[in-house]
Amino acid sequence: MVNKGRLKMALAAEKGVDFQKLHQKKVAKQAQKKKVQKPAANGGAEDEDNLDEDEDEGGAPVSDDDDNSEDEEEESDIEMAGAMHDESSSDSEVEMEKKIERKPKSSLKATKAAAPKPAQDDEDEDEDEEEDEEDIPMSDLEDLDDDEKEDLIPHTRLTINNTTALLASLNRIAIPTDKSVPFATHQVIISDEPTAEGIEDIQDDLKRELAFYKQSLEAAKKARTLLKSEGVPFSRPNDYFAEMVKDDGHMERVKAKLVEEASAKKASSEARKLRDLKKFGKQVQVAKLQERQKAKRDTLDQIKSLKRSTRHRPPDFAVDYANPLTERQESSGDVGTNEADLFDVGVEKELKKHGGQKAFGRGGREGGVNAKRQKRNEKFGYGGKKKNAKSGDATSSGDMSGFSARRMKTGAKGKPAKTSRLGKSRRQAGGNKY
Amino acid sequence: MAAVYKSLSKSSSSQKAEAPANGVRKNKQRVLILSSRGVTFRHRHLLNDLAAMLPHGRKDAKFDSKSKLYQLNELAELYNCNNVMFFEARKGQDLYIWLSKVPNGPTVKMHLQNLHTMDELNFTGNCLKGSRPVLSFDSAFEQQPHLRVIKELFLHTFGVPQGARKSKPFVDHVMGFTFADGKIWVRNYQINEVEAGKGAADEEAAAAAAASKGRGGKETDISLIEIGPRFVLTPIIIQEGSFGGPILYENKEFVSPNQVRADLRRKSASRHNARAEQQVERLARHGDLGLRTSGGKKAAADALDARELFA
């Protein structure tokens, strides 16, 4: 049964095609005749006038459409008849086939129903005809003489753009997508502006893809509002599970890829950071070391100068720092030195305190400074170089504190009464010149 | 009894056939998806990706012939399909796609380039298998007749008809077709709905929400995530019939990939050719000067040559 139906259908289809061609020719001839006759037999009705104008302007398309419509109707009638015979087989494909054949008819109706569409078509064709004028098809030049033909430079590829036939076949298959049918039947959204305008350079991947994305996003938004207004379910509920285009394995792979990419990115950025740190860290370290050394030198210098200054200080100074104001008032002449002294004394005090604490810590005994240890340290040497410790240096030789002009002038006579010089050990133990 | 049933069913079915012509006609499409022999694995994967998205598609075995494509019509009718998407591979590298309406055309042949299958792309988007896509067309598709025909064919092939057998009831992806640079760029995105964030866009969304409140939908923001595959199509010809008939449109700008490859080869060969020519010229010059031991012109014997004088 099925085979029989198929065969019949095939036959009918073949017939249909043949018939169509024949019929097209016939109708074309008729249309031409009509064209010739019409100016003569002008009824004066406005509609007809309009039709004529259309034909004059748009050329073939309108008449072609008409041809097709008649053509299709007849054809589909035949198919219908064939289908009716086959109905007994009650095959689903028959129904299908019939639908296909019926399509053009109703689609034509739809396009006819939509008033603005034909006008638009005409406009399009006009444009196309203008474009076609740039290239002249060889078929149009057949009237020329042979001599003239020799001068022609034929293009290897002709522009074939048979707009009327294109539109005819479009009308034959078109599914209505205008506002007369619900959006859900076709779900087609046409953007408002050509997307190509938004793309400056087609090779620029990022901008190009962005333009595509924008077009689709706009479409999705429009579609959602349209579908929602028609009451068609749009978004998938969270508890709706069904097979997806990409299976779980694929998505797993995608995820793994993403993770890998992210981790690679992180690792590389960390490595870069480390590299940078290494580069700068060296400099920072050097700077820090230098700073530390400088600080150390400064404090050492300070201590040195402090020691020296305390060494040359008059004996009553120890009293003075308890009451510094009186000192300053008395000897306002050398305020600078006094101020330095004042400051240094404070530092010395601090240093002493620290030293004491240090000793205390080390000795582990209570009772302040371990005097014996200190002595022994000094005697036997503890820490640092002792050689040349007593030899003079630039500061000591430049130190004129012990010099007095009066004494120099008086000479040996004017020598102050000889103080009894202590023994060496006691002198050293005293630490001071005195 | 059977006869009664038959007559009843006949009358009812004939009514059914009549009814849609008056009212809303049902959009029924079925697509036969198949490839020629000699497709590469990427072409095959693309075919599978597309077939996964088309619940109204019928995938068939590879078609054996490249010259007798009209046989596809019979094949499609056998499978009860009114559309054909045929992948024709040439030389194991070029892919041409034919889209056709089966009984009586039109057919469009396109060259497929820049192919990236879903598998390669690693996009995070995903959608239901067989959900109906929103087809987003560039407005350029409305401007020229041949593009309108192509658009219609895309609509029939890639648009899943309402109520198709395995289709899912929700809309969760968009197929974008853009005409740029004389080519058609095809993209596929998932529609991702996220709760509308508090921001500048929120006011618009709030307004829209107020409008849609009656339907009780809670307003969400839409973003797209690409699913794949990606490819670019260059239309080559449009035929009036299905795999046959007169050519209605031919793309003048299309350059065959064979041509491109030949040009490239010629370019790379030109350097060698120039050198070979140079060598021949040099030999000829030497021959003319009599500098070659064999062949070429011998220099005329000079009367004052030592060999002549003291011979």
Image (cartoon, coloured by chain):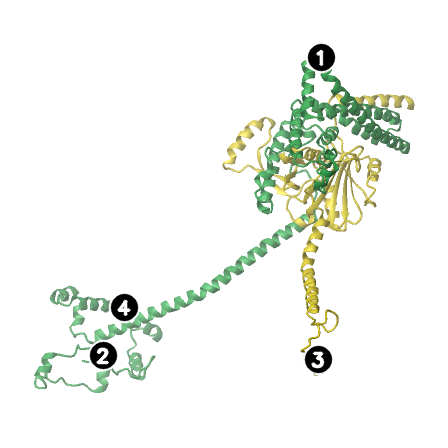
Chain colours: A green, B yellow
Tag nearer the camera, 3 or 1: 3
| Mark 4, residue position | A350
**As shown in the figure, which amino acid type bears the numbered disc 1?**
Gly
Residues marked 2 and 1 touching at CB (< 8 Å):
no
- Are the residues under badges 2 and 3 in a single subunit? no
Q: Is residue A369 above or below residue B17?
A: below
| Quadrant position of the N terminus of chain B in the picture | top right
- Are the residues under badges 2 and 1 in a single subunit? yes
Tag nearer the camera, 4 or 3: 3
Few, some or many residues within 10 Å of mark 4 (<14, 14–19, 20+) = few
Numbered circle sitting on residue A396: 2
Asked whether residue A171 is in view, the answer is yes
Q: Of helix, strand and loop, which one carries label 2?
A: helix
**As shown in the figure, which amino acid type bears the numbered disc 4?**
Glu
Tag nearer the camera, 4 or 1: 1
* Quarter holding residue B299: bottom right
Could you tell me how far apart the alpha carbons at marks 2 and 3 are, in whole angstroms?
Answer: 110 Å
| Residue A381 at x, y percent in the picture | 32, 82
| Quadrant position of the C terminus of chain B in the picture | bottom right
| Residue A204 at x, y percent in the picture | 58, 47
Numbered circle sitting on residue B308: 3
Q: Of helix, strand and loop, which one carries label 1?
A: loop
Residue A221 versus residue A162: which sits nearer the camera? Answer: A162
Q: Chain of mark 4?
A: A
| Residue A389 at x, y percent in the picture | 28, 82
Numbered circle sitting on residue A43: 1
Could you tell me how far apart the alpha carbons at marks 2 and 4 are, in whole angstroms?
Answer: 25 Å
**Sequence-wise first label, 4 or 1:** 1
Few, some or many residues within 10 Å of mark 2 (<14, 14–19, 20+) = few
